[in-house]
Image: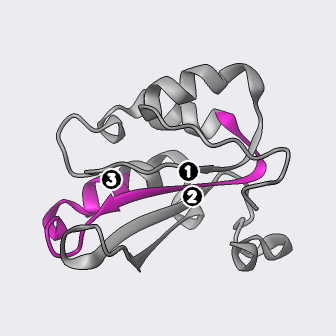
Amino acid sequence: GLRHPRTRLLFQAASDALAQLATELPFDLILLDMANPLHPDTPYADPQFLAHIKRLLASGGLCVLPVSSPRLGAPQLPAPVAELNALFGKNNVRCYFANVPTFPFGLCGFALCGQQAPHPFAASGRYRQL
């Protein structure tokens, strides 16, 4: 949980936080929260940002990040998912939607990504742990 000694919560720009953490790798889980994943200046548009996330993950590690709102950004949803598929491999990216009351229309799309083959969500019950 959030009180585990290995848990760190950082409240700052994702690119700044990830730059700070580069010396502390690897990470079992990276959760990113962005106010507007559809904004043109989002770090997701930078392939180096996504590659940096992948390098920070431990073997079998997972990353969760918002990718779109199905009501506001349905046409844009394929672009960030395609970027993640290209980086992590199509079998290592899963998308899901969750109710987020503070998000427009209350629904947000997320991507769950891993870097280990075979499919990290089938191995060791990692998907069920989340």
Q: Where is residue 9 in the image (x, y as percent from the top left)?
A: 62, 43
Report which quarter residue 117 is drawn in: bottom right
User: Dot 2, crowdedness within 10 Å: few (<14), some or many (≥20)?
Assistant: many
Q: Name the residue under label 1.
A: 88
Q: Residue type at mark 3?
A: Pro
For residue 93, above or below residue 46: below
* Residue drawn at x 76%, y 26% as measured from the top left: 24
Q: Which dot, 1 or 3, sits closer to the camera?
A: 3
Question: Which residue is at the far front?
Answer: 3
Determine the CA span between mark 1 and mark 2.
7 Å
Q: Residue type at mark 1?
A: Phe
Q: Which dot, 1 or 2, sits closer to the camera?
A: 2
Residue 112 falls inside the magenta stretch? no
Residues shaded magenta: 56-82
* Residue drawn at x 70%, y 41% as measured from the top left: 8
- Residue 113 shows which numbered tag? 2
Answer with mark 1 or mark 2, whichever residue precedes in sequence.
1
Q: Where is residue 56 in the image (x, y as percent from the top left)?
A: 67, 35
Q: Quadrant of the C terminus?
A: bottom right
- The residue nearer to you, when weighing 9 against 63, is 9
User: Dot 3, crowdedness within 10 Å: few (<14), some or many (≥20)?
Assistant: some
Q: Where is residue 16 in the image (x, y as percent from the top left)?
A: 48, 23
Q: Mark 3 points at which residue?
A: 80
Residue 59 falls inside the magenta stretch? yes
* Residue drawn at x 33%, y 70% as measured from the top left: 108
Q: In which quarter of the image is the N terminus?
A: bottom right
Q: Residue type at mark 2?
A: Cys
Determine the CA span between mark 1 and mark 3.
12 Å
